[in-house]
Amino acid sequence: MQTGGHTQGMSDLQRFGQLIRETRQRRGLKSEELAQRIGVSKSVMSYIETARTKSMPEPELLTRLALALGLSKRTMLEALGYLDPADDNEHTIAVDAHDPRAALLALLHDQPDETVTMAIRLVSALVNHMPGEAIEISFPSHHKSDTA
């Protein structure tokens, strides 16, 4: 099948559907919830995830999916077979404004690298700690008296 000048095989649509389904599940979203977020019916969402659609989703729908799932459009285009993952090493993460992760990104957006590095260490310690264990994190001291 020809779509936008490229051959579109069913295996590409199946990879895309699997990417969407697995990402949705990792995010803890039900199919109906994702469908509502991106403005499509449950049946359209099902067609996308099970590759029962015959053509690539429209660019506007790809954008809405990217934002809702925190995927880059590039990742989705790679799954659809339009881009070769080896062509570009650029990594982009998209986050929907309603995703709680967006608040963390907004706080760190204009911070210096040193602050972002400390935040990464803190979040990493929180994510990787065992329940009931104390969390120990040390940060470098930057008091003026330390450098005098």
Image (cartoon, rainbow, N blue to C red):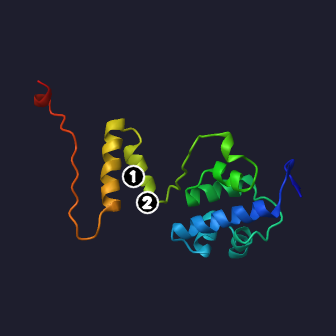
User: Can the viewer see residue 39?
Assistant: no
Q: How many marks?
A: 2
Residue 106 point in image, percent of width and height:
42, 47
Q: Provide the secondary structure element on which disc 2 rests.
A: loop
Quadrant of the image occupied by residue 22:
bottom right
Quadrant housing the N terminus:
bottom right
* Residue appearing at x 14%, y 26% in the figure: 147
Residue 49 point in image, percent of width and height:
69, 69
* Residue appearing at x 32%, y 37% in the figure: 114
The residue tagged 1 is 104
The residue tagged 2 is 100
Task: Find out whether the residues at labels 1 and 2 contact each other: C-beta distance under 8 Å.
Answer: yes
Residue 91 point in image, percent of width and height:
56, 44
Q: Provide the secondary structure element on which disc 1 rests.
A: helix
User: Can the viewer see residue 5?
Assistant: yes
**Of all residues shown, which one is farthest toward the top?**
148
Dot 2 surroundings within 10 Å: few (below 14), some, or many (20 or more)? few
Left or right: residue 50 compared with residue 3: left
Q: Of 112 and 13, which appears nearest the observer?
A: 13
Quadrant housing the C terminus:
top left
Left or right: residue 68 compared with residue 84: left
**Of all residues shown, which one is farthest toward the front?**
86
Dot 1 surroundings within 10 Å: few (below 14), some, or many (20 or more)? few
Residue 69 point in image, percent of width and height:
57, 60
Q: Of 130 and 58, which appears nearest the observer?
A: 130
Quadrant of the image occupied by residue 55:
bottom right
**What kind of residue is marked 2?**
Pro
* Residue appearing at x 83%, y 60% in the figure: 9
Left or right: residue 54 compared with residue 75: right
| Distance Cα–Cα, label 1 vs label 2 | 7 Å
* Residue appearing at x 78%, y 58% in the figure: 56
**What kind of residue is marked 1?**
Leu
